[in-house]
Structure formats: C-alpha cells, structure tokens
C-alpha cells in the first residue's frame, strides 16, 4: 500500500507502541491523527512529526467516553476526510489476583480495553468506508493471549474478548475490502503501567501496583526480560509488510512458540478424543 497522503488514525498515539506506529506510517508519507487521553504527549508527538513535514493532528480522547470518540471522528473527518488505517491501540492494566480484583477494577479495564475498542471502530468505520483502495483496521491484543499468566486476569480477559471481536470483524468487513489484523505485542519498554495509573478515573478507586504481583506473574509465565521485552520501535518493524499481505495475525516479538504449540496440541488432542468417541458426525 502506498501511504502517501493517506490518513492513519492511532489511538494511544502519544507514546509507546502508538507513537512507534505513527513513525513507521509517517516515514511512508501518511497523514496522522494521534488520539490519546494524555493531550500533552499527543501534542508533543504530533509537533515532532510536523517538524519533519508530516501532516499530524493531535486530539485528546478518552476511548471509554463515546462522546469523546464521536467528537474525535468528526474532527478527523473535518481535517483529513476519509480514513485509510485505524489502529485500535489503547489498553490499561490492573494487576491483581482474581479474588482481589474489585468490581471497579473489572469495570474500568473492560470499559477501556473492550468497550473502548469497539466504540473506536464504530465511530471510525464510516470514515474507512468512505476511503478508497486498501484499508486496514489494526487491533492491538497482547502476547498474553497465548501465554496467560496469574495476576493479569482482568487484562487477559479483555484481550481474549478483543481477539473474538477482531475475528468476527475481519469476516464482516472482508467483502468491503477492509482488512482486519490482530496485533500481538510482547512486553515492551514503554509507559504502559505509568499511563494506566494516570488514566484510571478517581471514581473507580485507587490504582494499585504491587511488586509481588509482577514478580509472581513473571515466575508463573516463565518470562525472561531478555527474550520477551523489546522496544516499541522494534515491535513495529514488520507492521507495514504484514499489512501489505493482509495478515490475520501479527506477532511482534517474544520467545513463546513452545507455549503456543503446547496449547494447540492439547486442543487437537481433545478434538481427536471427541472424534474417536463417535462425536465426529451427527448423533443418531
């Protein structure tokens, strides 16, 4: 895809993975709309892009607020017109054992990571439909979809939901020529935990980050930072090439092929047991 003068909308575009995405699209001549709850960081990122000749717009947006998203979509259309790529890239994290997570913890994480993603697509899909040629929706899930770990229950639940949503969205938009790709980044050296803490509304209760939760999660997942954590810039190194091929899944980095193979082996073994027990056809 030739991105020159094409419009790319990125939620969470002010820093981290979203900002790295912005850089790779900008290098190809795209016009950028950076949406972020942190207005200052979005504006700083957009200003830096404009200094390099990129048409970049920064908008303060809370994806958990549908009114905020609606205003952003209207502003993007006013400034750029149709949209060609939508990167749904906002996610918050709340560590904690399942029996320690509060109702507010669950409501907050799901309202941002799931409802916020769905509302983002709903608001910007009309702009994608007005675009011509190759168009994409990129939905950021997580490598934890393949490597679920303790103390990350709310976050992982939200990412499982996003994958289900993305799978169906891909099927439903295929006939319109709009590709949907699911992005699975591993651990990154970003501000994810800092930005999560800053984004939590006061009415949802205090943001908690216990070192013991992180250490327990890392031990349980068998993670080593050297093989699982990378920079956001490294994570997006193949993004445009994978989008060109309309890849269904984009895995960015990490050493967890064995976990995927083990999981799929158990699924297939279970399927084979079902077939062997006579479940492969229509019951009499």
Image: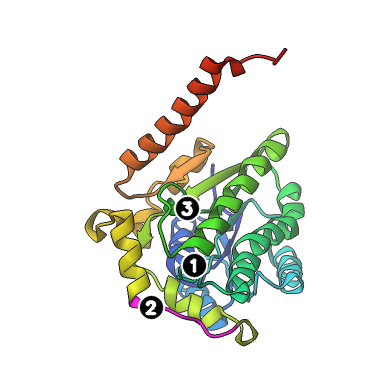
* Residue 139 locus on image (x, y percent): 57, 52
* Residue 154 locus on image (x, y percent): 53, 63
Q: Which residues are magenta?
A: 205-211
Say if 150 sits above or below 281 in the image: below
Q: Residue at x 53, y 72 (%)?
A: 101
What's the image's color scheme?
rainbow
Check if residue 223 falls in the magenta segment: no
Q: Check disc 3: other Cα within 10 Å, few if <14, some if 14-19, many if 20+.
A: some
What residue does disc 3 label?
28
What residue does disc 1 label?
53
Which of marks 1 and 2 precedes in the sequence? Answer: 1
Quadrant location of the N terminus?
A: top right
Check contact, mark 2 vs mark 1: CB within 8 A: no
Check contact, mark 1 vs mark 3: CB within 8 A: no
Residue 82, numbered circle: none
* SS at badge 1: loop
Number of residue marks: 3
* Residue 172 locus on image (x, y percent): 72, 38
Which of marks 2 and 3 precedes in the sequence? Answer: 3
Query: Which residue occupies the foreground of this view, 133 or 221?
Result: 221
What residue does disc 2 label?
210
Say if 239 sits above or below 176 in the image: below
Q: Is residue 103 visible?
A: yes
Q: Residue at x 59, y 52 (%)?
A: 162
Quadrant location of the C terminus?
A: top right
Q: Please name which of the two marks, 2 or 1, marks the residue nearer to the observer.
A: 2
CA separation in Å, label 2 and label 1:
43 Å
């Amino acid at each position: 895809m030739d991105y020159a003068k094409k419009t790319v909308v990125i939620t969470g575009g002010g820093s981290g993975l979203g900002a790295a995405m912005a850089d790779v699209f900008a290098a190809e001549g795209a016009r950028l709309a950076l949406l972020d709850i942190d207005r200052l960081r979005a504006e700083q990122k957009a200003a830096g892009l404009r200094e390099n000749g990129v048409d970049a717009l920064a908008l303060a947006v809370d994806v958990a607020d549908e009114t905020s998203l609606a205003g952003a979509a209207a502003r993007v259309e006013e400034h750029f017109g149709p949209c060609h790529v939508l990167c749904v890239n906002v996610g918050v994290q709340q560590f904690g054992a399942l029996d320690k997570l509060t109702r507010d913890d669950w409501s907050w994480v799901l309202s941002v990571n799931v409802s916020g993603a769905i509302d983002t697509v709903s608001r910007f899909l009309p702009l994608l439909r007005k675009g011509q040629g190759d168009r994409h929706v990129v939905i950021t899930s997580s490598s934890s979809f393949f490597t679920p770990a303790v103390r990350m229950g709310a976050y992982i639940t939200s990412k499982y939901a996003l994958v289900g949503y993305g799978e169906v969205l891909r099927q439903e938009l295929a006939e319109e020529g709009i590709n949907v790709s699911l992005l699975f980044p591993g651990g990154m050296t970003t501000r994810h935990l800092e930005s999560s803490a800053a984004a939590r509304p006061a009415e949802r209760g205090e943001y908690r980050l216990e070192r013991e939760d992180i250490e327990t999660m890392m031990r349980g997942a068998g993670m080593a930072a050297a093989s699982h954590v990378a920079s956001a810039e490294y994570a997006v190194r193949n993004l445009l090439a994978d989008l060109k091929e309309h890849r269904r899944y984009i895995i960015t980095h990490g050493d967890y092929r064995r976990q995927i193979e083990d999981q799929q082996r158990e699924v297939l073994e279970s399927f084979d047991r079902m077939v062997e027990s006579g479940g492969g056809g229509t019951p009499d």
